[in-house]
Image: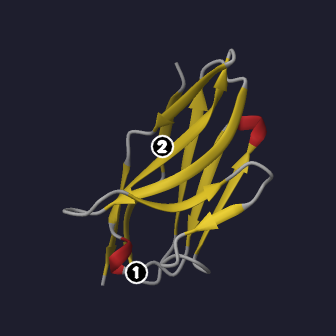
Amino acid sequence: QVQLVESGGGLVQAGGSLRLSCAASGNIFRINAMGWYRQAPGEQRELVAALIPGGSTNYADSVKGRFTISRDNAKNTVYLQMDSLKPEDTAVYYCRFRGTRWGTPFDSWGQGTQVTVSS
């Protein structure tokens, strides 16, 4: 069982910054992709940022230049640095890891962390 634990959400004023963390626990053999998603009330969950095999990154157009995804392989942790936050960034943020454990693919989600940006 690969479990993800998120931290770092909260309330911030527009223009401020937050850093989200997501740590994976369990006997993980290989993580192939890591990403952050968000879901605002009444909206579908959307991809915010992702790290894909080879080290490439992928960002939603709405966050390019403001958000940065990074990872610490030794800690099995992914981060999302969010700068110049806007009220429209308000949502529940979820991390997602995909990989293989003992040769079996897994696809795990974090529990979600609330980010609220006030105007």
Q: On the rendered structure, is 57 left or right of 43?
A: right
**22 in relation to 62, above or below:** above
Q: Earlier in the sequence, mark 1 or mark 2?
A: 2
- 42 or 19, which lies in front? 42
Mark 1, residue position: 86
The number of discs equals 2
Comparing 64 with 89, the one in front is 64
Identified by mark 2, the residue type is Glu
Q: Residue 22's image quarter?
A: top right
Please say if 36 is above or below 62: above
Residue 88 spot, x, y in % from top left: 34, 77
SS of the residue under disc 1? loop
Q: Residue at x 67, y 23 (%)?
A: 28
Query: Could you say where residue 17 lies in the image, as x and y percent from the top left?
Result: 51, 72
Q: Which residue is mark 2?
A: 6
Q: State the CA–CA distance, disc 1 to disc 2.
A: 21 Å
Identify the residue at image location x=69%, y=35%: 31
